[in-house]
C-alpha cells in the first residue's frame, strides 16, 4: 500500500529541525528488557536502608509493645445447638422449621377477604380465579368454567351509599367493573374449600359423574397452590395489637438444659441476635422433645490469621497510606462510640487482633467452651470470653451478646444465628398508620396514611377519604347553603375531621383508678342536608380494624406508653405529636432449605 503524496516528507531531518509539520500526536513505547531468566531478585523485597526501617518502626510505635509474641496455633471447643422449638406469644409450642425464614414465621398475617361485609382484594380474587381456570383447562375440564363463573361470580354492589367503597373511586370501580361477569371469584372458592367438609364439585351440575372426583382432586391441588404462594398462619398469635409489635420465643438445648430466647419487643422487620433476650423460663417451652442430634460438640484447630482492613500499615511493603481509608476525615462526636471504637481499633489495636474462623449454620446457638492459644515462644494460654461475669457488672463490655431478662444472673456469652433471611424484597406498602398525640384534646389519632383499595394496592388515605365524602354528598344532591351572616366577622367553632383520622380515647384500665389505655373510637360522618342519621366512619386498615371483623365486634385497646411523645404535626388547629408509625407491606421472602429455593409471599406488619 502506497502513502498518499500529501503525507510524504521529502527531507525528514530538515522538517524536524525547522518544525515544519507540527503535531500533537506522539507515540512513546517503553518495553522491559529482561537481563536474566531468573526472576527471584525481582520478587524479593530487598532492604537498602535499614535505618529508615527502624525509624518507621519507631514512628508507628512498634518499640512500645508489651509482648512481642504472636499466636501461631489455636484449638477451640465449640458447643452448637440447633434452635428446635418456636412459640408465639399465647400460642402452642411447635417444632421450628428452619427451611422457612423466621420473618415469615413471625410476621405473616391472615388475609382478610371481607371488611364491613364488603368484598376486598379483587386483585387476589382475580388471580386465584384465573389459576382455577388454568387448572380446569389443564385436565380437559374447561367446559366447567362457565358453571364456576356462575357459582362464584364477581358482581358490582348496589349503587347507593353502601357502595361508596367502589363507586367513589374511579380506578377501583373501573377494575371492579372489568372483572364483574368475566372472572371467577377465586377468593370465594378458596374460602369455601378451606372447610374440610366442602368440595370443589359442590353446587356444580356434572356432565359426567366421573368428573366429581377429578374436580375434588383439582380443588385440593388449588388449595396447595394458594398455600404455597401465600403463607398464612392458623392464627395470628405472634402479633400483639395492643403493643403494636410481635412477641415470640424459641429454644435450643445447651448442655442438656433448654435455653429459652424471648423476643418480647420485636418490630424491626429483620430477626437477628439482638432481637432476643435470654428468658428465665424453668423447664423450657415444653412441646415435642428435642432430637438427639440437636446438640453437638466440636473441637477444631486453627492457625490464627491477623485481622486486616483497608488502609492499615502493610507489614512488608510499608504501604502506610491508602486513599480508600482516610482516618483524618473521620470526625465523630464525643458520644459517637461506634466511630470512636473503630478509630481506636484501626490506629492502636489493629495488629493485636487475630481471626480463627468457625462456620456455624443458620438456626444455631453456639457457645465457645474453651480456647487454647499457643504463641511463637511455645507458651500456651487459656482464653476466656471478655464478657464473662455477672450480668449487672458495669465493668463488662461485649459485642454480639444475648442479654438476660434478669440483671442479677451470669452473663450469657452464646452467639445466636437465627434462621432468618439476609435480604428481603418488599413491595409497596398496603397500609401505613401514623400515630399522633393530640395534647389539646388529650387523645391520640391513628392517621391512616395508606389504606388498601378495593382492587388491592395501597392508596392514599387522604384521597380515599375525600372521594368517599364527595360521593356521599353527590347522592344527597345540592343543598342550600346557610344564610349570609349579618355581622362583618364570623367565627367557625369547629371543623370536621378527615375520615382517615381514627380517634383513640383514654379510658381507665379495669380495676385501676390511675392507669389508662387508649380505646379505638369512631367519628360520625356528618353531611349537611343528609336526612339519614350519621353513620360511624370505619377504619380502613387491618392495623386499626382489630376486632371489627369478628362476631360480635370487640373493642381495641392500645397501651398508652406505646405512643411516645416525639416529632411534631399540626392538623385541624390542634397540636399533635407524631409518636409511632406502623406499616403493613406485601412482600416476598426467599424460602431456602437443603436444595430448595422458592419464593413465598407474606404479610408483614412492622413498626418504625
Image: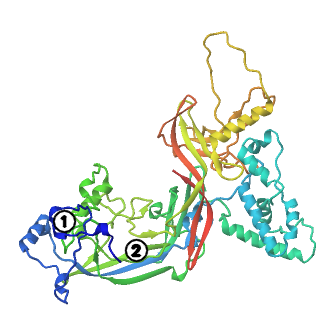
- The circle drawn on residue 367 is 2
Q: Is residue 153 above or below residue 594?
A: above
Q: Nearer the viewer, residue 361 or 551?
A: 361
SS type, badge 1: helix
Give the label on residue 15, or none.
1
**By what rule are the colours in the image chosen?**
rainbow
In this orientation, does residue 500 appear? no
* Residue 585 as seen in the image, left or right of residue 578: right
Who's the residue at 78% across and 53% down the image? 178
Residue 434: % across, % down: 56, 44
**Image location of residue 559, percent across then percent down:** 56, 45
Q: Quadrant of residue 593?
A: bottom right
Q: Nearer the viewer, residue 336 or 548?
A: 336
**Label 2 or label 1, whichever comes before in sequence order:** 1
- Residue at 19% across, 75% down: 316
Whole-angstrom CA distance, mark 2 to mark 1, is 82 Å
> Toward the viewer: 322 or 430?
322
Q: Is residue 379 above or below residue 179?
A: below
Give coordinates of residue 327: x percent, y percent: 25, 58
Q: Residues within 10 Å of mark 1 (few under 14, many from 20)?
A: few
Specify the quadrant that holds the N terminus.
bottom left
Amino acid at each position: 500500500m502506497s502513502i498518499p503524496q500529501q503525507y510524504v516528507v521529502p527531507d525528514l531531518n530538515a522538517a524536524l529541525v525547522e518544525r515544519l509539520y507540527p503535531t500533537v500526536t506522539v507515540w512513546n513505547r517503553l518495553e522491559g528488557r529482561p537481563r536474566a531468566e531468573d526472576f527471584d531478585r525481582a520478587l524479593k523485597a530487598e532492604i537498602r536502608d535499614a535505618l529508615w526501617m527502624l525509624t518507621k518502626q519507631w514512628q508507628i510505635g512498634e518499640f512500645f509493645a508489651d509482648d512481642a509474641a504472636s499466636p501461631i496455633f489455636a484449638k477451640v471447643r465449640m458447643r452448637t445447638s440447633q434452635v428446635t422449638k418456636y412459640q408465639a406469644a399465647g400460642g402452642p409450642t411447635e417444632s421450628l422449621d428452619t427451611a422457612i425464614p423466621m420473618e415469615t414465621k413471625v410476621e405473616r398475617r391472615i388475609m382478610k377477604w371481607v371488611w364491613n361485609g364488603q368484598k376486598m382484594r379483587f386483585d387476589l380474587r382475580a388471580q386465584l380465579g384465573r389459576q382455577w381456570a388454568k387448572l380446569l383447562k389443564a385436565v380437559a375440564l374447561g367446559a366447567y368454567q362457565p358453571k364456576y363463573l356462575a357459582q362464584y361470580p364477581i358482581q358490582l354492589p348496589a349503587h347507593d351509599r353502601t357502595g361508596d367503597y367502589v363507586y367513589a373511586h374511579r380506578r377501583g370501580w373501573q377494575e371492579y367493573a372489568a372483572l364483574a361477569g368475566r372472572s371467577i371469584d377465586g377468593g370465594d372458592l378458596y374460602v369455601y374449600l378451606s372447610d374440610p367438609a366442602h368440595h370443589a364439585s359442590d353446587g356444580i351440575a356434572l356432565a359426567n359423574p366421573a368428573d366429581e372426583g377429578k374436580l375434588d382432586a383439582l380443588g385440593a391441588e388449588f388449595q396447595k397452590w394458594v398455600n404455597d404462594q401465600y403463607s398464612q398462619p392458623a392464627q395470628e398469635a405472634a402479633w400483639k395489637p395492643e403493643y403494636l409489635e410481635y412477641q415470640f420465643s424459641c429454644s435450643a438445648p445447651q448442655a442438656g438444659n433448654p435455653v429459652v430466647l424471648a423476643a418480647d419487643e420485636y418490630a424491626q422487620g429483620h430477626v437477628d441476635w439482638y432481637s432476643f433476650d435470654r428468658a428465665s423460663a424453668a423447664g423450657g417451652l415444653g412441646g415435642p422433645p428435642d432430637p438427639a442430634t440437636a446438640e453437638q460438640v466440636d473441637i477444631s484447630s486453627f492457625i490464627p490469621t491477623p485481622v486486616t482492613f483497608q488502609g492499615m500499615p502493610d507489614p512488608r511493603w510499608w504501604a502506610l497510606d491508602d486513599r480508600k481509608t482516610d482516618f483524618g476525615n473521620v470526625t465523630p462526636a464525643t458520644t459517637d462510640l461506634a466511630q470512636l471504637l473503630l478509630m481506636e481499633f484501626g490506629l492502636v489495636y489493629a495488629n493485636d487482633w487475630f481471626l480463627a474462623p468457625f462456620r456455624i449454620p443458620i438456626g444455631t446457638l453456639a457457645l465457645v467452651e474453651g480456647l487454647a492459644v499457643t504463641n511463637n515462644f511455645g507458651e500456651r494460654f487459656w482464653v476466656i470470653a471478655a464478657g464473662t461475669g455477672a450480668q449487672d457488672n458495669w465493668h463488662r463490655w461485649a459485642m454480639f451478646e444475648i442479654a438476660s431478662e434478669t440483671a442479677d444472673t451470669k452473663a450469657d456469652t452464646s452467639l445466636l444465628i437465627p434462621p432468618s433471611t439476609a435480604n428481603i424484597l418488599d413491595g409497596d406498602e398496603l397500609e401505613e398508620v401514623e400515630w399522633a398525640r393530640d395534647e389539646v384534646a388529650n387523645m391520640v389519632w391513628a392517621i391512616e396514611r395508606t389504606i388498601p383499595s378495593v382492587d388491592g394496592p395501597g392508596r392514599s388515605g387522604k384521597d380515599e377519604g375525600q372521594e368517599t365524602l364527595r360521593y356521599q354528598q353527590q347522592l344527597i344532591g345540592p343543598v342550600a347553603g346557610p344564610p349570609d351572616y349579618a355581622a362583618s366577622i364570623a367565627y367557625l367553632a369547629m371543623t370536621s375531621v378527615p375520615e382517615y383520622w381514627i380517634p383513640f380515647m383514654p379510658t381507665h384500665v379495669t380495676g385501676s383508678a390511675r392507669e389508662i389505655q387508649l380505646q379505638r373510637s369512631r367519628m360520625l360522618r356528618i353531611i349537611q342536608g343528609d336526612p339519614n342519621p350519621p353513620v360511624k366512619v370505619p377504619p380502613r386498615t387491618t392495623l386499626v380494624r382489630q376486632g371489627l371483623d369478628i362476631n360480635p365486634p370487640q373493642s381495641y385497646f392500645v397501651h398508652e406508653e406505646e405512643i411516645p411523645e416525639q416529632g411534631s404535626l399540626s392538623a385541624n388547629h390542634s397540636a399533635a405529636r407524631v409518636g409511632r408509625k406502623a406499616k403493613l407491606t406485601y412482600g416476598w421472602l426467599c424460602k431456602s432449605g437443603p436444595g430448595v429455593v422458592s419464593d413465598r409471599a407474606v404479610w408483614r406488619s412492622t413498626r418504625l
